[in-house]
Image: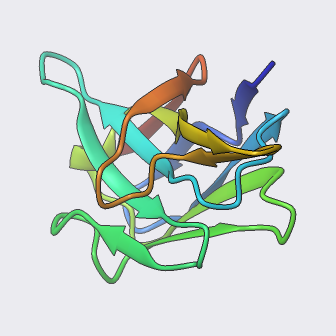
């Protein structure tokens, strides 16, 4: 069973930094896509960054050059380093991971970042940036 648990949120002044972590227990799919999303007050959920099993990354234009997504080698922990934070970064941040697309023998292959199906979600962690 896959469980995602975020931590590291908090309150910071504009220009500051935070590092979010997501403990991903049970997620053993090297092919899968892991990501960070956020939902700001009164807005739709938006994708922030993704990372594939090969380490390839994508970022929303609004965070490029300021945020960095990374993972440890076992994919048991996902990170989001957030620098030069702005008040508009205030949101609840969620980590997510794709589910299994197909199985071949004893190996399960999860959906890649190119065609994601985010089946697993964390409970979210609040990030508040004050001006």
Q: Nearer the viewer, residue 13 or 90?
A: 90
Side of 61 where 4 appears, left or right: right
Q: Taking 96 as reference, is 56 above or below it?
A: below
Side of 38 where 10 appears, left or right: right
* Quarter of the image with the N terminus in it: top right
Q: Nearer the viewer, residue 94 or 57?
A: 57
Q: Is residue 131 visible?
A: no
Q: Provide residue 80's location: percent of width, then percent of height.
A: 57, 59
Q: Provide residue 107's location: percent of width, then percent of height.
A: 76, 48
Q: Quadrant of residue 17?
A: bottom right
Which residue is rendered at x = 56% and y = 45% of the image? 110
Which residue is rendered at x = 72% and y = 36% of the image? 7
Numbered label tally: 0
Q: Taking 99 as reference, is 35 above or below it?
A: below
Q: Nearer the viewer, residue 12 or 117?
A: 117
Q: Provide residue 48's location: percent of width, then percent of height.
A: 33, 53
In the orientation shown, which residue stands out farthest toward the front? Answer: 105
Side of 119 where 14 appears, left or right: left
Q: Nearer the viewer, residue 45 or 40?
A: 45
Q: Provide residue 106's location: percent of width, then percent of height.
A: 83, 43
Q: Is residue 5 visible?
A: yes
Which residue is rendered at x = 52% and y = 48% of the image? 12
Which residue is rendered at x = 66% and y = 58% of the image? 79
């Amino acid at each position: 069973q896959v469980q995602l648990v975020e931590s590291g949120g908090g309150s910071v002044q504009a220009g500051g930094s935070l590092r979010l972590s997501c403990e991903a227990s049970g997620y053993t799919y090297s092919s899968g896509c892991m990501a960070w999303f956020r939902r700001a007050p009164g807005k739709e959920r938006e994708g922030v960054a993704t990372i594939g099993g090969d380490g390839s990354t994508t970022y929303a234009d609004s965070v490029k050059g300021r945020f960095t997504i990374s993972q440890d080698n076992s994919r048991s922990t996902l990170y989001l380093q957030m620098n030069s934070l702005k008040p508009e970064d205030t949101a609840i941040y969620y980590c997510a991971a794709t589910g299994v697309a197909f199985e071949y023998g004893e190996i399960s292959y999860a959906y890649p970042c190119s065609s994601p199906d985010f089946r697993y979600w964390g409970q979210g962690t609040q990030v508040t940036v004050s001006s």
